[in-house]
Image (cartoon, helix red, strand yellow):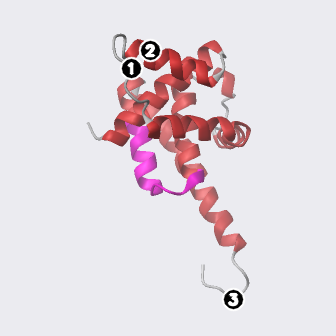
């Protein structure tokens, strides 16, 4: 399994733990890695932790985007796994470091592994809508006369 895919999986599991317990993120990270490595304590997964810290730093913005683009779904009514996959995906889309197609594909892989086929369609629809919205916003922000 590629390292970044494993990191995203870990980030999802920790975010799910945080969402269920509403404990401080650092405690959720510690609890996850303590159970993952019961006898030895290697370094934490830096990419997973950076995703988690990024999601938490922008949680209101991320959740707001999900709420606006998840038609007929309130955040609290979404399955927790789907909600947290969306949080990770939206954060990565906002960062713009990973190509959008890769970000969406990775989110769909997580959904296939941890949720249902119906959820794959839902997650894809929400992330695609957010991505299209972002592209439209970037196009609107270009100065007059510049090609779009």
Residue drawn at the location 65% of the way across and 21% of the way down:
77
Q: Earlier in the sequence, mark 1 or mark 3?
A: 1
Q: Which mark is residue 41?
A: 1
Crowding at dot 1, Cα within 10 Å, few <14 / some 14-19 / many 20+, comes out as few
Estimate the x, y position of residue 16 in percent, counting from the top left.
54, 21
- Give the residues drawn in magenta, as a range: 94-109
Residue 60 found in image quarter = top right
Estimate the x, y position of residue 56 in percent, counting from the top left.
65, 35
Q: Is residue 106 magenta?
A: yes
Residue 23 found in image quarter = top right
Residue drawn at the location 51% of the way across and 23% of the way down:
14
Residue that label 3 marks = 145
Crowding at dot 3, Cα within 10 Å, few <14 / some 14-19 / many 20+, comes out as few
Residue that label 2 marks = 34
Q: Which mark is residue 125?
A: none
Query: What predominant SS class does the magenta segment belong to?
Result: helix
Q: Are marks 1 and 2 in contact (CB under 8 Å)?
A: yes
Estimate the x, y position of residue 7 in percent, counting from the top left.
40, 35
Q: Earlier in the sequence, mark 1 or mark 2?
A: 2
For the residues labelled 3 and 2, the Cα–Cα distance comes to 56 Å
């Amino acid at each position: 399994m590629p390292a970044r895919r494993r990191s995203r999986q870990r980030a999802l599991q920790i975010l799910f733990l945080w969402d269920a317990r509403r404990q401080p993120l650092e405690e959720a990270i510690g609890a996850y890695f303590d159970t993952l490595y019961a006898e030895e304590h290697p370094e934490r997964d830096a990419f997973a932790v950076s995703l988690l810290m990024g999601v938490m730093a922008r949680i209101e913005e991320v959740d707001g985007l999900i709420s606006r683009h998840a038609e007929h779904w309130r955040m609290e009514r979404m399955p927790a796994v789907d909600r947290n996959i969306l949080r990770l995906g939206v954060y990565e889309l906002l960062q713009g470091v990973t190509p959008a197609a890769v970000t969406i594909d990775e989110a769909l892989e997580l959904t296939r592994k941890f949720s249902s086929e119906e959820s794959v369609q839902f997650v894809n629809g929400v992330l695609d809508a957010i991505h299209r919205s972002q592209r439209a916003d970037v196009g609107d922000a270009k100065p007059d006369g510049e090609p779009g």
